[in-house]
Amino acid sequence: MPYLEVLTLASISILIENEFFKEIFLAIIIFAVSILLAVNEDEIKDKQYQKKYILTVYLVVYLYFTFLKPNNHFDDIFLIIPLVFIIFLGGINLSYKSDLLEKELGRLNLLTYKSFEWFIITRSYLFFICVLFLIMTNGLHSYNWKLLLITIPIFLSYHLLSNIIDTFGVKNFEEVKRSLNKYIEEFDMELSDLKSYDYEFLIECLSFVVYMEDKDYFERKGTVFNPYYVIRRKINRNYPRVKSIVSKTRKKILLRRVFQRIKQLNFKLIIKAIKYIHKYVRGYSTLEQQIIRTLAMEPDSYRYTYRRKIFVEFIYNIMFFRAIRKQKKRYREIYYLTEMEVIKISLLKFYYNYILESPKNLNVLFTKLAEQSRVSISCYKHIYYDYFTYSTESIMFKSIIRRGLLVVNKILYDSKNYKIYHVKDNIKTLLIDGISSRPISSPNGRYIAFINPFGWECMSNIYVMDLCTRNLLKVYEWKYSLCPKYIQWETDETILIILGETYGTIEIGGNLYRLNIENKELEIVKEFEKDIQITEFTIDEDIITVSGIKYTNNENFSHIPYKESFKYQ
């Protein structure tokens, strides 16, 4: 053994046996533990604390290999366990500073998330790189003190200098939620003032955004890119064509055609395309990932690509929306949609209002989308007019978004007291005085209709409320002797009504009418005999089935059930 190493080991042995130095060593251990537990530290993310933390961890690494003297690779790798435990200690320290929304994650998820956050913001992966480097060079268990004394100071210096200039950071959940809510509320305020044409244009724009940016947005259960949903969508779209090809063509012919296509390929063009592909291909991100990296990152943090991709777009993204869903379930703020659909609609509002800056026409929309990607404006126009307008996806997206926008104005019906309430920001307001029938929703979900006052021998009216503009209109006003007794939507513009006599114990039903809510025109659909009283009906495409009673004598005291089906136009 070289003289220098013998002298070093002898000096260490003397120091260990000395009581004074044992006390110093114990003091160092206590000092290290107090730093790792963040005792008397008010700001965990402060650079000064991070400096003490980094110094302490490297001290632990040095003391481990100096005093425990590992003699095989198992002992070397065993150091990984205390290092991981130290990271968890950092996560515990951060967890004490977590806000209310972060605490919705629960104990295990909160500790996991905060540990990853501490691992990323302190660049703790450099600890592990240092240890692995020393293990791989086989310098520790053979006590190559030169390598040990050179490697640790180099890594320590690099780590401290990197930490000094590092500006990476993320905001807490509550701060991100406040930013989201701010722009969503602005969107809702603008939505309440929209006219019918502007409302349909908005739905068109939002649907196109989903079509271009994230086709699996409403189908996907998670918030990060999942190849399963992409493959499933591709198979569902192409399955009929694939099935017909396989059924009409034998496998040998198919394989022969495939090999012919491969032979016809110009490999020079392929190599050239691969060479320049990085100029045109960008990473795929879901709408949730795009929003989170916009809101959650501290200023000047976006340039840290790997940490942004790994931590912000995946770990932070997943944990944030998991906390949001738990909070939504607890407060039950949803009326028409599931918790996940409401969250996705809210995020879509934010994306449209904040990132795209609420474009007022299609050209502006194409321009804003082009600024967010490498796709040209002309390409967006081509896709919109040639593909999106006639696609089945656009119909599905519009249906979900139309229903989702109605969550702005939630309608609750009190079936015990027969009252209708309008709910906004968890504040319940009586919509109209008097007893009302249960409100029914139009096919597109934009309108609700109900009868008020509703009851026996009441002079009833029919009201329609536009849930987007919050306008409440009286579309049918009681006229002498004719009272609405049952209503049902026929289309988005027309309602079918049973109108009958207001007064009289035997006038429980009436005849069938059609009411246009735009011009308030009333036309009769079918008139029945005087001894027939229709009380309700169902619609199945172009067939109406009515039910009620039919009186069997002249005094109209006894009756039998009555049912009839007929076609109508």
Image (tube, rainbow, N blue to C red):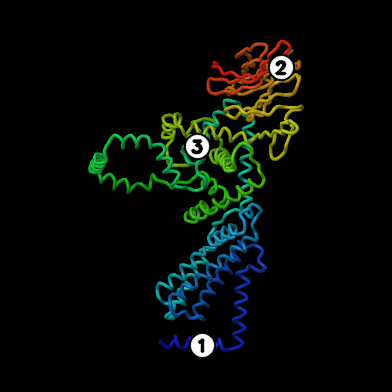
Residue in view at x 52 percent, y 55 percent: 311
Residue at disc 1, secondary structure:
helix
Q: Is residue 73 above or below residue 1?
A: above
Q: Residue 182: which quarter of the image?
A: top right
- Which image quadrant: the N terminus? bottom left
Q: How many marks?
A: 3
Residue at disc 2, secondary structure:
loop
Q: CA distance from mark 2 to mark 1?
A: 115 Å
Per the image, the residue denoted by label 1 is: 11
Q: Is residue 328 above or below residue 169?
A: above
Residue 506, image x, y percentages: 73, 16
Whether tag 3 and tag 2 are in contact, CB under 8 A, the answer is no
- Which image quadrant: the C terminus? top right
Per the image, the residue denoted by label 2 is: 558
First-in-chain label (1 vs 3): 1
Three-letter amino acid code at the position of disc 3? Val
Residue at disc 3, secondary structure:
helix
Three-letter amino acid code at the position of disc 2? Ser
First-in-chain label (2 vs 1): 1
Residue in view at x 34 percent, y 47 percent: 276
